[in-house]
Amino acid sequence: MNYVIDSIIIVATILGLWWGAVWVVEAASRIAKRLGVSELIIGLTVVAMGTSAPEFAVTVGAALKGQADISIGNVVGSNIFNLGFILGGVALVRAISTSRSLIYRDGALMIGITFLLLFFLRDLAMARWEGAILMALLAAYIGFLIYQKDGSDEELPEGEFQWLDIPRLLGGLALIVTSGHYLVESASSLARAVGVSEWVIGVTIVAAGTSAPELVTSLIAVLRGHYGISAGNLIGSDIFNLLGVLGLAAILQPMRIDPSAYTSLYVLSGMVILAVILMRTGWKLSRWEGALLLIINIVRWIMDFQR
């Protein structure tokens, strides 16, 4: 009976995620125009932080319970999932246009902080001071984006702003976060029933579930021609996960991970570098490049489930 209830909840939450994403994308685009900033900036900040809320809740909650493998595994798994399955899958549906700002500013930062995470976790532990450094970097990054709000090579979005766009954006984010939470709970329940380990649940089931907001938001954005929101949401979410989510979790509760978990960090580093290189070629992520990222992610998932 529990299997049936979990399945119904999963279907309902997927619908909730979809409608919430529609509201967020359309409202965010018009709010960006009203503020005079590009869709990329909005995607990197407001939309990225909103869609990262499930990762934030799961990671911080797991850290406070002493479940470091789920905490760090969720962030690492979500970022790999974002770059492999979501970025690749969205590009497979429609090629994603990129820009110099996205590659040389945000992509370069994402590569840098991924290697910084490798350095911090070399001893299989993350201390409070290391978490504080990550949080400080996030504050500096957001401050720089606000300072450079014109988005340089990014065009401003179209559409007339209405005051209802603000509650529509907040309502859409709330629907996404709520749906994402129940999707994770139901999917994890099904996984535990078949005896899947905590680390595998963290880097696969939980990571995929908490990344569902990024998936639907980026897919809706690219289908409606809002490439800045689509790409910015994914890159921004990855940056926010590494700096903000993991940083705060480490400040609240220093963490240690299992030695076998460290290999996933190498996979993340490779995915980040590959994704940035592919987005730079031709200033777009083509369908075949999206297919490549998707295949790599599927192989990685299969390997994780066999551990």
Image (tube, rainbow, N blue to C red):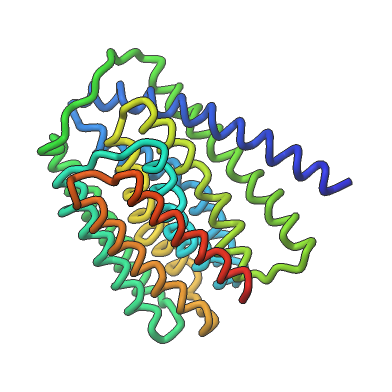
Q: Quadrant of residue 273?
A: bottom left
**Residue at (28, 13) in percent of width and height:** 160
| Position of the C terminus by quadrant | bottom right
Q: Quadrant of residue 301?
A: bottom right
- Mark yes or no: residue 45 visible: no
Name, please, the residue furthest toward the right.
1
**Residue at (45, 43) in percent of width and height:** 214
In this picture, residue 284 sits left or right of residue 216? left
- Mark yes or no: residue 4 visible: yes
List x then y, in percent, for residue 133. Answer: 29, 68
List x then y, in percent, for residue 299. Answer: 51, 65
In this picture, residue 225 sits left or right of residue 305? left
**Residue at (19, 31) in percent of width and height:** 37
| In the image, residue 77 above or below residue 266 | above
Nearest the eye: 177 or 129: 177
Nearest the eye: 46 or 228: 228
Q: Quadrant of residue 158?
A: top left
List x then y, in percent, for residue 285. Answer: 28, 46
**Residue at (44, 47) in percent of width and height:** 86
